[in-house]
Image (cartoon, helix red, strand yellow):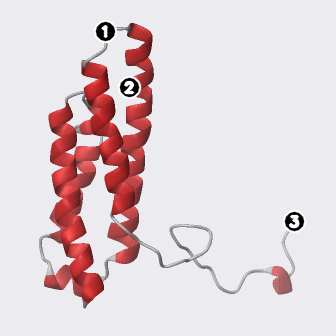
Amino acid sequence: MRLPRILTPRVTASAHCDLPCGVYDPAQARIEAESVKMICEKYQANTDPEFRTRAILIKEQRAELVKHHLWVLWTDYFKPPHFEKYPHLHQLFNEATKLAGAAGAKGATDPAKADELLAKIDEISKIFWETKQA
């Protein structure tokens, strides 16, 4: 059944949440990445198989949230003028999201991988706050 023309939406909008709030902060990604690191450390210090299985599941969820928060910044906050001023920003986001993914912290239990991710988030954060000052 087709909707009557009067009920068909005329404008389509999208945002990182249900309400385009305009609130962005790399701290969201950082908090999740810190959680990934702590889980890796606890995983390394514990030999209980049930604990380790649960730790991996939670770590993978947190890593997925890191990717989500990075993607929101990359696709919703940063605009063409930012990428012009910071030409390495696309590469930085690409590296950070890969470090949050299966090839990085999501797929590893080494706290050093989480440290690499945190360092990339710090670089993104520095640029983010510079753009907020402008």
Amino acid type, residue under disc 2 in the picture: Ile
Residue 1 is labelled as 3
Q: Tell me the residue at 23%/58% (across/down).
A: 121
Residue 62: x and y, percent?
41, 41
Residue 116: x and y, percent?
15, 46
Q: Are marks 1 and 3 in contact (CB under 8 Å)?
A: no
Q: Tell me the residue at 19%/29% (across/down).
A: 110
Counting other residues with Cα less than 10 Å from the Cα at mark 2, is it few (<14), some (14-19), or many (20 or more)? some
Mark positioned earlier in the residue sequence (1 or 3): 3
Counting other residues with Cα less than 10 Å from the Cα at mark 1, is it few (<14), some (14-19), or many (20 or more)? few
Residue 47 is labelled as 1
Residue 57 is labelled as none
20 sits left or right of 95 in the view? right
SS at circle 3:
loop
Amino acid type, residue under disc 3 in the picture: Met
Q: Which is in the foreground here, disc 1 or disc 3?
A: 1
The residue under label 2 is 56
Residue 99: x and y, percent?
22, 45
- Distance between the Cα atoms at labels 1 and 3? 58 Å
Q: Which is in the foreground here, disc 1 or disc 2?
A: 1
14 to 85, vertically: above or below: above
Q: Which is in the foreground here, disc 2 or disc 3?
A: 2
Q: Is residue 100 visible?
A: yes
Q: Tell me the residue at 26%/87% (across/down).
A: 133
SS at circle 2:
helix
